[in-house]
Each structure stands twice: as structure tokens, then as C-alpha cells.
């Protein structure tokens, strides 16, 4: 009886600490260790030891509220997932943009786009690293997918002021790979973040890259829309991404596309050699 009374008293104490914080139960919270070391708490199940740590997203969304995840059983049941048949078509100033999953013969061109797109950013991508990343993503399906955007000249484009109208085409080619996007449906296909970790069971946009020669033409917006469409088709309700705090143009793209900030890092992270980012999310209707 004495032990039960102690547990009841401890629950009340913990409740008094948590109540002012008004944290939803979907957030993980942890009591300071000195408090947990008090003798009265030693016999309380770990599941009862809660308290406020941070109000924003040091927390993880509960499995009950998360979107369906992709695990090994999904791969076994659906080794040739319809993810590979995905296709998006949209207009462009220079022709027609067709977005589809990366194929092995496109790895070289995709790695070039990655290197060019991130050449001036803090996370510059050497050409060999880009190639290795593309090759790895080819093996990730259905846990992740790498999309490429190819620009195809239309008959109207090809007929105007030839040959300069299609001077962007590689010699002997009928299209040009100008953009890439990488989507993760499982933690195995994304990096592990020191802070602002997106929920494991939600879709996550790893990156979008557009060849600098084709920017300011709405290509990035179409790549983003295609990624959202694919995620929604696969049953996901939320789409997460990170963006650098100083990247005004990228953040504007995401905000005008319906994304909201979940949390952001302090600029003090620069002292660790990292660039501060914010975590954003969009919920599909």
C-alpha cells in the first residue's frame, strides 16, 4: 500500500510539472535526470516518466497519427512497385518538361545537374559524390525514389529561330536532363539529422536540383509538385523538408506552395561548422 501511495504521489508531482506546458501527447518529453533519480520515482514504470524538454519539434509524431511507412514486408509484397511507372508532364518556356524516375543510363547526366546546382552552396556536391548518390538511390525503391526532369522541345519550339531555339539540346539527343529531386519514404533512404529530425513514417523531400541555366522558369515548382503528387498517390498525408535559413528563394518557393515552418535551428549551430536550417511541412487535403 505504501508503494502504491508513493506512485500516486509521484504521478501527481509529474502532472503538476507537465500541465503548464500543455504539450500534446504526440510529443516525446523527458524529465531531467536529477529529478528521475529521486527515490520516490525509482519504482515507477518508464512509460510514466514524462516532462517538458522543448516545445517544438524535438518530438516525434506518434505512430497513430503518422502516414503509412514502407518496410521490408512492403518490398516483399510489391517488388515492382508502381512507383516506377510515375510520370509528370508540364509546360516550360523551352518546351515540355517530363518528370519520371531515374534510369541507370541517366546517372551521369543527373550527377552533373547535382554538381552544377549545388556548386555555390555550402553543401557543394563533387561530381563523383553525385554519381554515387544517384547510383545508391537506384537501389532504394520503394524506400525512396530519385526523379529526373527532362526538357523536350515541342514542334513549335523547334520551328522557331532554329537552330538557336533548341541550342540547349546535347548533340544527337532529343531531350535534356535539367532537374532532379529525391524523395524518402523510409529512414534508410535519408540522412540522419542532429536536430529537427522529420518523422520516420512521413514522406521527406531530400533535395531538389535545377541546372542553373534553366532556373527562373518554374522548373523547381514543377519538380516539387510532382514529388507531392507521388507522395500523395502512395498514401502519405504529410510532406517534410529542410531549407537553409539564408536561402530566401527556396524558402519562398516552399511557403508559396503551402509549407509552414515547424521549427528552426539557432544561428549558433554555425559554431559547429553547420549551416542552420528550418524544418517545414505540408499537409495534403
Image (cartoon, rainbow, N blue to C red):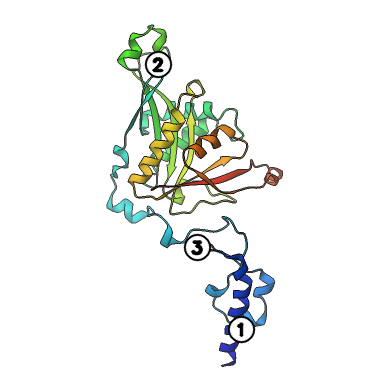
Q: Tell me if I can see residue 202 in this picture.
A: yes
Q: Classify mark 3: helix, strand or loop.
A: loop
Q: Is residue 175 left or right of residue 276?
A: left
- Marks 2 and 3, how far apart at CA: 51 Å
- Marks 3 and 1, how far apart at CA: 24 Å
Q: Mark 1 points at which residue?
A: 9
- Marks 2 and 1, how far apart at CA: 74 Å
Q: Classify mark 2: helix, strand or loop.
A: loop
State the image coordinates of residue 225 (x, y, percent, origin top left): 40, 36
The quarter holding residue 88 reads top left
Q: Is residue 158 left or right of residue 188?
A: left
How many neighbours does mark 2 have within 10 angstroms: few (below 14), some (14-19), or many (20 or more)? some
Q: Mark 2 points at which residue?
A: 169
Residue sitting at x 51%, y 51% = 198
Of labels 3 and 1, earlier in sequence is 1
Residue sitting at x 33%, y 18% = 174
Tell which of 80 and 211 is nearer to you.
211
Residue sitting at x 55%, y 37% = 251
Q: Name the residue under label 3.
A: 26
Q: Tell me if I can see residue 124 in this picture.
A: no
Q: Classify mark 1: helix, strand or loop.
A: helix
Of labels 2 and 3, earlier in sequence is 3
Tell which of 111 and 19 is nearer to you.
19
State the image coordinates of residue 104 (x, y, percent, origin top left): 36, 32
Of labels 2 and 1, earlier in sequence is 1
Please state, as top left, top right, bottom left or bottom right, where the N terminus lies in the image. bottom right
The quarter holding residue 65 reads bottom left
Amino acid at each position: 500500500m505504501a508503494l502504491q501511495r508513493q506512485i500516486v504521489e509521484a504521478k501527481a508531482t509529474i502532472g503538476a510539472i507537465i500541465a503548464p506546458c500543455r504539450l500534446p501527447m504526440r510529443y516525446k518529453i523527458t524529465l531531467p535526470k536529477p529529478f528521475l533519480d529521486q527515490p520516490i520515482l525509482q519504482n515507477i514504470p518508464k512509460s510514466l516518466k514524462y516532462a517538458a524538454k522543448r516545445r517544438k519539434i524535438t518530438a516525434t509524431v506518434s505512430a497513430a497519427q503518422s502516414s503509412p511507412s514502407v518496410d521490408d514486408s512492403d518490398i516483399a509484397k510489391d517488388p515492382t512497385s508502381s512507383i516506377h511507372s510515375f510520370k509528370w508532364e508540364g509546360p516550360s518556356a523551352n518546351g515540355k518538361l517530363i518528370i519520371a524516375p531515374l534510369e541507370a543510363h541517366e546517372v551521369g547526366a543527373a550527377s552533373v545537374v547535382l554538381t552544377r546546382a549545388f556548386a555555390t552552396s555550402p553543401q557543394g556536391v563533387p561530381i563523383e559524390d553525385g554519381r554515387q548518390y544517384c547510383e545508391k538511390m537506384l537501389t532504394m525503391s520503394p524506400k525512396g525514389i530519385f526523379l529526373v526532369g527532362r526538357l523536350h522541345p515541342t514542334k513549335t519550339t523547334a520551328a522557331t529561330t532554329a537552330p538557336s531555339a533548341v541550342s540547349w539540346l546535347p548533340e544527337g539527343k532529343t531531350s535534356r536532363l535539367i532537374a532532379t529531386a529525391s524523395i524518402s519514404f523510409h529512414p534508410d533512404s535519408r540522412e540522419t539529422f542532429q536536430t529537427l529530425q522529420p518523422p520516420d513514417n512521413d514522406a521527406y523531400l531530400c533535395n531538389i536540383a535545377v541546372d542553373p541555366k534553366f532556373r527562373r522558369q518554374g522548373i523547381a515548382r514543377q519538380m516539387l509538385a510532382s514529388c507531392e503528387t507521388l507522395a500523395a498517390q502512395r498514401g502519405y498525408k504529410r510532406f517534410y523538408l529542410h531549407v537553409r535559413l539564408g536561402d530566401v528563394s527556396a524558402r519562398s518557393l516552399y511557403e508559396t506552395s503551402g509549407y509552414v515552418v515547424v521549427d528552426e535551428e539557432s544561428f549558433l549551430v554555425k559554431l559547429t561548422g553547420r549551416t542552420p536550417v528550418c524544418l517545414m511541412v505540408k499537409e495534403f487535403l
